[in-house]
């Protein structure tokens, strides 16, 4: 006659059931492995396996061959990918245009059906439970997605800390590392006696703040903030950069560098050494050095996450942080 489970083992089972009822473990999300249960609750692997088997028999968990253990219950099933991008992606030569082309190609090559919507910053559309939304520069849609409670993927930004991060994936770039790289490249060509200026994005933008912080880890530099990331808005701040008489300017994106270059060329004054960030198509056409978004890795990471979600993986959200790399051209 089998020995009844000890009081400790019974308590562990109750705790596992409580986890499944806490509202954070949605149907389809991955549950703890046998090994993790054994380590966390100080029981043997065999006992953990038996408890999980009991929870499967009770209909609370389900095992998927070669995949693991998942929370049982009805779940939404994504059938397609929905790219929801800022309308700026329509501008040829822009970061968004390259991003859209990269993602459409990579996802289609992996057999995924893709719908594309281009929105204004404050515009929203209804979401479908059949479409996995991938978002870029559409803050109103990010908030709607969080309220919706379904899975989504943010590109080139990270979700704020909180419960919403359990459902939202993100793929971003190590901005601080990129700033460090830019400073090291300039330092290899110039000494610290030269004057360095950072043409930064908006003051409250976390990406800009990280890029500035990284650069200043290696070189002392004055910072001039542009009102936005866009060329039209950067003209006035470019003039403030040049009034500081810099020997080199690091632009926190390529359009900010372009604004400095335009300012100098329009006035026929010497152009300082320049390096930008993103490696948008404009950087290549103007022969500007840039800290490049790893476009291939971005497309591949997006495809991997989309595949998981379309295959029914409802695990908690994943943050992917990619390393940028320098692309050196005439401007340095």
Image: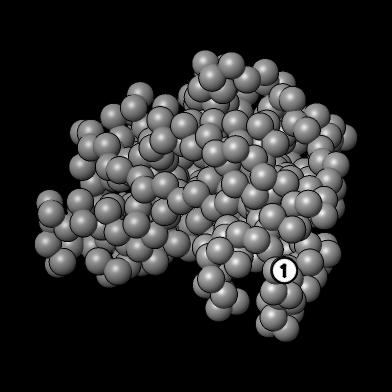
Q: Residue at x 63, y 20 (%)?
A: 112
Residue placed farthest to the front in the image? 1
Please identify the quadrant where the C terminus is shown: top left
The image position of residue 312, as x and y in percent, is: 70, 36
Residue placed farthest to the bottom in the image? 7
Please identify the quadrant where the N terminus is shown: bottom right
Mark 1 secondary-structure assignment: loop
Q: How is the image coloured?
A: one colour
The image position of residue 270, as x and y in percent, is: 23, 43
Q: Is residue 295 visible?
A: no
Left or right side of 29 for 245: left
User: Looking at the image, is 331 positioned above or below residue 317?
Assistant: above
Left or right side of 238 for 331: left
The image position of residue 293, as x and y in percent, is: 40, 39
Pick the residue in front: 142 or 180: 142
Task: Specify the quadrant of the image occupied by residue 42.
Answer: bottom right
Q: Residue at x 39, y 44 (%)?
A: 277
**Residue that badge 1 annotates:** 1
Left or right side of 130 for 36: left
Q: Residue at x 23, y 46 (%)?
A: 273
User: Looking at the image, is 38 positioned above or below residue 238?
Assistant: below
Pick the residue in front: 254 or 51: 51
Pick the residue in front: 110 or 288: 110
The image position of residue 111, as x and y in percent, is: 59, 16
Pick the residue in front: 206 or 23: 23
């Amino acid at each position: 006659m089998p020995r009844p489970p000890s009081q400790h083992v019974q308590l562990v089972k109750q705790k596992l059931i409580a986890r499944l009822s806490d509202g954070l473990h949605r149907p389809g999300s991955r549950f703890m492995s046998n090994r993790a249960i054994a380590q966390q609750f100080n029981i043997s692997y065999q006992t953990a396996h038996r408890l999980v088997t009991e929870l499967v028999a009770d209909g609370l968990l389900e095992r998927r061959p070669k995949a693991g253990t998942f929370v049982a219950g009805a779940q939404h099933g994504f059938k397609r990918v929905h790219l929801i991008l800022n309308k700026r992606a329509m501008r040829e030569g822009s970061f968004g245009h390259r991003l859209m082309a990269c993602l459409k190609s990579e996802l289609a090559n992996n057999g995924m059906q893709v719908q594309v919507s281009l929105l204004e910053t404050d515009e929203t559309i209804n979401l479908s439970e059949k479409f996995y939304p991938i978002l870029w520069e559409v803050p109103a849609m990010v908030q709607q997605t969080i309220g919706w409670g379904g899975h989504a993927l943010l590109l080139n930004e990270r979700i704020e800390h909180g419960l919403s991060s359990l459902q939202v994936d993100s793929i971003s770039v190590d901005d601080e590392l990129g700033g460090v790289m830019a400073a090291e490249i300039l330092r290899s060509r110039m000494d610290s006696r030269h004057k360095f200026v950072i043409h930064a994005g908006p003051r409250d933008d976390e990406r800009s703040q990280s890029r500035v912080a990284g650069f200043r880890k290696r070189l002392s530099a004055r910072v001039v903030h542009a009102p936005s990331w866009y060329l039209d808005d950067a003209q006035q701040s470019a003039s403030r950069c040049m009034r500081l008489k810099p020997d080199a300017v690091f632009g926190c994106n390529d359009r900010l560098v372009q604004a400095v270059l335009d300012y100098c060329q329009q006035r026929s004054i010497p152009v300082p050494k320049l390096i930008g960030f993103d490696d948008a198509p404009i950087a290549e056409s103007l022969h500007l050095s840039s800290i490049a978004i790893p476009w291939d890795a971005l497309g591949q990471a997006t495809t991997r996450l989309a595949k998981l979600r379309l295959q029914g993986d409802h695990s908690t959200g994943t943050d992917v942080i990619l390393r940028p790399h320098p692309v050196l051209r005439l401007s340095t």
